[in-house]
Image (cartoon, grey):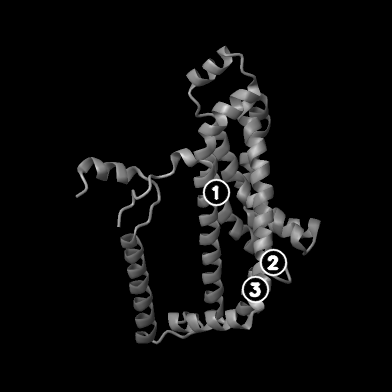
Amino acid sequence: MATRDDDADESLEPQGWTRRDVAISAAGLAVFLGAWELAVRALDVPAVVLPPPSSVLTSLVSIIRSGAVFWHLGVTLTEILAGFAVGASAAFVLGALIAQFRIVDRLLYPYIVAFQAVPKVAIAPLLVIWFGFGLESKILMTAVIAFFPILVNTVVGLRTVEQDRIDLMVALKASRWQVFRYVRLPTALPFIFAGLDVGIVLSVIGAIVGEFVGANAGLGYLLLVYNNDLRIAAMFALLIILAALGIILHGVVQFVQRRVMFWSAPRAGSGGP
């Protein structure tokens, strides 16, 4: 029998899903889908307004069996990963400079915040005009959307280091680079990965927004095609695919975080049955 101290420790352990958690989540989803199906049929809601889950599932199976969706999925995934890589790299480098140098902070950070306030949907047409209808404009759109949360978390993380640790490194004649590598960066990693977790999910949104503005391939392009044809069930099926893609990418970031931050991984068996 678990003690109170064990329960307290377990509550502090991150993310470990147990079989009970999975069962509760699956039951909640089943109840939601069942209520949706019953409500649509009882109220006789037209399928063009809100299709029942059974129709969405049929469309999802049909789309997957056709195989055409995999080409569009590959295009969108390429845009997501490339845009996320560009945005995350730029955000980390700039965040490190802002956290380290006051002049960079005062010179750039206010304008970055102002740029973040501009609706990204308004920027997307400009990117299409400047870079065309190919992958480049979608990658840049994705990078722009993923950039800010990663930047903010990087800056905050690098600034949360205890001053005593920095003073100790300086007393030991450590260079600025050594202080950054051995003190600031390890302390900032939880914040950086939190930003990466948000950024990878936002990257999915960025790619779809870019495809909405102008594209001839991708899941966003397919959504527009199905919308024009009033294939609402197929649109819901694509939304399920996008949601699954976001969950998978989120899981990949979590996996990398556990590998990089191995010292903070939960203890084996802490989740319990």
Mark 1 and mark 2: Cα distance apart in space: 24 Å
Q: Earlier in the sequence, mark 1 or mark 3?
A: 3
Of the residues tagged 1 and 2, which is closer to the observer?
A: 1
- Along the line of sight, which residue is nearer the eye, 67 or 133? 67
The residue lying at 31 percent from left, 45 percent from top is 11
Q: Which residue is mark 2?
A: 75
Q: Is any atom of residue 15 visible in this view?
A: yes
Q: Which residue is mark 1?
A: 256
The quadrant of the picture occupied by the C terminus is: bottom left
Which corner quadrant of the image does residue 252 belong to?
Answer: bottom right
The residue lying at 32 percent from left, 64 percent from top is 24
Could you tell me which secondary element the residue under label 2 belongs to? Answer: helix
Name the kind of residue labelled 3 in the image: Phe
Q: Residues within 10 Å of mark 3 (few under 14, many from 20)?
A: some
- Give coordinates of residue 132: x percent, y percent: 80, 61
Name the kind of residue labelled 2 in the image: Val
Q: Earlier in the sequence, mark 2 or mark 3?
A: 3
- Along the line of sight, which residue is nearer the eye, 126 or 13? 13
The residue lying at 35 percent from left, 82 percent from top is 38
Relative to 151, 139 lies left or right: right
Relative to 200, 135 lies left or right: right
Mark 2 and mark 3: Cα distance apart in space: 9 Å
Which corner quadrant of the image does residue 177 belong to?
Answer: top right
- Which label was assigned to residue 70? 3
Name the kind of residue labelled 1 in the image: Val
- Along the line of sight, which residue is nearer the eye, 186 or 263? 263
Could you tell me which secondary element the residue under label 3 belongs to? Answer: helix
In this view, 202 is above or below 165 = below
- Give coordinates of residue 123: x percent, y percent: 69, 54
Q: Earlier in the sequence, mark 1 or mark 2?
A: 2
Could you tell me which secondary element the residue under label 1 belongs to? Answer: helix
Which corner quadrant of the image does residue 245 belong to?
Answer: bottom right
